[in-house]
Image (tube, helix red, strand yellow):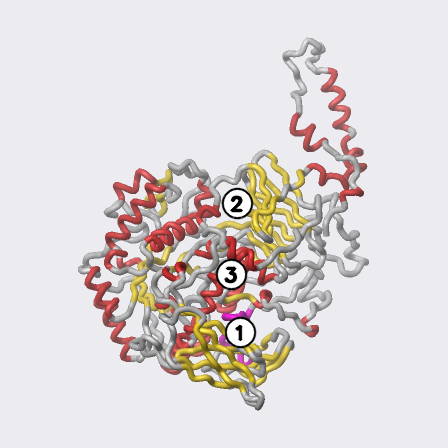
Amino acid sequence: MSIDETKASPPFTFQRHVYRNLIPLHDTTSDMKPSNGLHPLRIRFIIALLSLPCAIGNAQHTLISDMDLLRWEKVMLGVWKASFGEIGLNPRDYAGAPNIEAIKALGDGLFPFAEKSTYSLLSPGRASIRLPLDATEKIYGLGLEFEGMNRRSNVYSLKVDHYGGTKGYTHAPVPFYISNRGYGVLINSPRRVKIHVGIGNRKDSQKPAPIDRTTGTNWSARPLSDAIEASVQGGGMEIFVFIGQTPLEVVQRYNLFHGGGVIPPKWGLGFWHRMHTQSSDKDVLQEIEDFQAHDFPLDVIGLEPGWQSFAYPCSFDWDSTRFPDPKAFVQTLDKKGIKVNLWENPYVAPTSSMYDEMRHFTGSHTVWLGEVPDYTLPDAQAVLLRHHQKNHLHIGVSGYKIDEVDGYDFWLWPDHAIFPSGHDAVEIRQLYGLIIQSMLDVHFRQQNRRTYGLVRSSYIGATNLNFVLYSDYYDHEGYVTALANASLSGLLWTPEIRSAKSGEEWIRRFQSVCFSPLMMLNAWASGTKPWSFPEVTDMVRNNIELRQKLLPYIYTAFYNYHKVGIPPFRAMVLEDSHAVPDEMAPASMDDVDNPFSEEQRIEVTDQFMMGPSILVAPVFAGQDERTIVLPRGNWFDFYTGTFMGNGEIIKIKSKLEEIPLLVKDGAIIPMLSSLEKTANTPPLEVRHYGTKENTFNLYNDDGVSFDYAKGDFSITQLVAKQGTDGKFKGTSSQLTNDEYTYGPIVWRWMTVE
């Protein structure tokens, strides 16, 4: 709802043009100075000041004129930009370049705000904006969050930090929000953005009439506001607006604006196991034998702090007692088809072999008594990359887990720290994880070698970077909410498993992990194995194998992430057909659940979409049945093809061995028939569900390089079509070269009338 400028009174300018330019009451230079030191003009000013309350009362509805109108320019189809002041260290410098052709393919649209309805204010020490908000709009996004989905009627302090009680303190507080009205707003700033989402009414805003709490009805502790207001401590902002016919298109445009999503190496979508921190090379080799003995697949071994000669801070050098011959160790694993991922935090110990060279490019404060490199400096980046290339990457290490770039204030450097680049310490902390991701990503791309890693913090434009977020937070339901929320901000998130209190919790957590962007057991402290709860070991194995068989489907979903910006794992609010059934309408006010009658928004946070057609509904320990909200359209059980419902809420009895997977009508799901790694062209089982005809363009490439960017990939078109006899028939054809085609295809018709 925009502000009607035609009804505005003459501008009330005291605060902006008088108060900020006060002349001292005592003038020691003027010839007109009276004997008491007060200038006559100052006396008149004092009289005016005493009459100020009356002036405020007469002009309280015109305060908006204190702000400047934002001036928007269209930078490409469906994308507008406004800016004021200076933003400092630009986060977008560490993002990918826009995929302009893919953005063009989304088409164009109208700017979402009315003329003269968007404002900025630059005051000493703070920059702020005000954007219109309709009373019924829902707002989503604002980065990685573990609670809820709709951000309306709350205040968020978007600070890179460990997840805590303050809303917005999280690992990736991306200042990008999406409206269900088909637009999104990015506040591009390296500073901590504080955003009031439809909360906090200006005196001159359009707002409902007050309601007496004692005698009235529907009183609200958080009255609706007609605006979103955001501010930073700093000298300015860039604001980008993205439009789309649907919220999904808005997210697509945002992702493509930052280069499009990643395509991980195929090994990155396999099973990861992180060793106990004190493990040696012999321990790792024994662990691999144990995996083989228990018939569990293993694609990546993660080494935790103990691989280094010094950790917290880090030496980044191999510990010679645990790993006396790192090259032989890494290459031994490589021959077994297992990649090595190394844990590190960025802080350089005095014992590190790169300490003397790096210390010239570090900040004024230490973390765990280790130097903090200023990675905005090319020289600092060069020191790290030379060291890592020589000691890790050259011998075959696949990538890194970047820890401790999100931590509490009492761990990391203070806001007043000084860095040699001259950049502000707050800005560097907000962007530190993003900068390190970008640095490593560029290095791997230069070698035409894909990586897939883990990181504890991220920020604007990370869509194109080959890293997945993780956390010490361990609430299972919160993990699933985070997985869905991440998709709204160009992020990937893994609900890693570490430990469990029972076999039931173990298998339930494993199921969530298996249907996420990175499938990992992180046993760095627990020492757990996939078979640690024998009663569910076979179930765990079956779920891992199902995930691996779905590789052709999931890999294609990541290709679509890269090519057209559709998140491979995404929140239900991005489904075009998603609508909340009437029976889930908000409850009225009561004195227990809703004592303040605050605006309630129905949120589906415990289910999400994987790829174009599969709805994933994790089950949590203790649940005998599972409620699932089905979008419009027919939905079928993945395992049996049984019809499950259409645009309704269903309840199903939970099975311990299965995570509920529901599939859209007409879905085509390509799967590996075998997990044998020896096959160059593995055979496929292609499933079709429901009664709709459909087409699926199956993507494949070499799985390790960036040659796909030069057109070196294959697209196989799978078509399910109904014949004149009413029976379905499946066909396949090559749309591109056939170098990376799969083997023989067997069609399986899952739904039988």
Q: Mark 1 or mark 2, which is nearer the start of the sequence? A: 2
For residue 189, the mark is: 2
Contact between labelled residues 1 and 2, with CB atoms less than 8 Å apart: no
Tell me whether the residue at label 3 lies in contact with that at label 2, contact meaning CB atoms closer than 8 angstroms.
no
Residue 624 located left or right of residue 596:
left
User: According to the image, label 1 marks what residue?
Assistant: 613
Query: For the residue marked with disc 3, what is the amino acid?
Result: Gly
Earlier sequence position, callout 3 versus callout 1: 3
Q: CA distance from mark 3 to mark 1?
A: 16 Å
**Main SS of the magenta segment?**
loop
* Residue stretch in magenta: 606-625
Magenta span includes 615: yes
Residue beneath the point at 51% across and 53% down: 100
Mark 2, Cα crowd under 10 Å, few <14 / some 14-19 / many 20+, is many
Give the structural element (helix, strand or loop) at label 2: loop
Q: Of the numbered discs in the image, which one, if any, rests on residue 549?
A: none
Disc nearer the start of the sequence (3/2): 2
